Each structure stands twice: as C-alpha cells, then as structure tokens.
Amino acid sequence: MQTDTDVLTAPDLSWRENALCAQAGPEFFFPAPGSSTREAKQLCGACEGRVACLEYALTHDERFGVWGGLSEKERGRLKRQSR
Ligand code: SF4
C-alpha cells in the first residue's frame, strides 16, 4: 500500500525508461580508470533523459561513471562551483 510519504519521497526515475546507456552496457559508462569517456558522453548528448539523469547523480552523490554526460570529476567540479 502506498502512503502519502511514499509519494513525497519516491524519486522520479521515469527518465531511465528511455536511457540510451541501457543499450550500451555498463563497461561503456563505468570505464576503467584512465579510459576514455568520450563515447559515453556522446551517447548522453543524444539521450532525452540527460538533465534528469544528471540531477539524479548530483542529488544522490553518484561517485563513479558517466551520468548525464559528465564524468565523476566533472560532476565534482560542478558541485563545488554551485556551493
Ligand atoms: S544521460 Fe547518459 S548516463 Fe544518463 S540515462 Fe542518458 S545515456 Fe544514460
């Protein structure tokens, strides 16, 4: 049974339904250290859920991989700039 609290706290994850990365495989978006993230970022650039994905990653402090077109270093920089 869903309560009012569940509705208020449940994040909207509908952007995942059309996530282009789901077709590419996790190694593509979670590359080994030092590997290129260029292809993953290109895919993110064409993904309609990019903004919501990036917001999710920033809100949930996702530390690894490419989310919303940004690497972990780029997300860290963005968070520091927004403080
Ligand atoms: S923006 Fe990139 S990481 Fe996020 S759902 Fe789309 S393809 Fe996946």
Image (cartoon, rainbow, N blue to C red):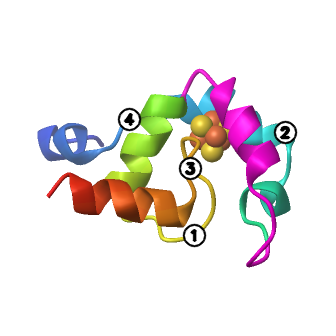
Q: Nearer the viewer, residue 82 or 28?
A: 82
Q: Which residue is mark 2?
A: 23
Q: Which residue is mark 1?
A: 64
Q: Which residue is mark 3?
A: 67
At mark 3, the secondary structure is loop
Figure disc tally: 4
Q: Which residue is mark 4?
A: 12
Q: Is 67 situated left or right of 23 in this image?
A: left
Could you tell which of marks 3 and 2 lies nearer the N-terminus?
A: 2
Q: CA distance from mark 4 to mark 3?
A: 16 Å
Q: Residues within 10 Å of mark 2 (few under 14, many from 20)?
A: few
Image: 33 above or below 42:
below
Q: Is 1 situated left or right of 63 in this image?
A: left
At mark 4, the secondary structure is loop
Q: CA distance from mark 3 to mark 2?
A: 15 Å
At mark 1, the secondary structure is loop
Query: Which image quadrant: the N terminus?
Result: top left
Magenta stretch bounds? 32-49
Q: Which residue shows up at 52% across the image and 64% down it?
A: 72
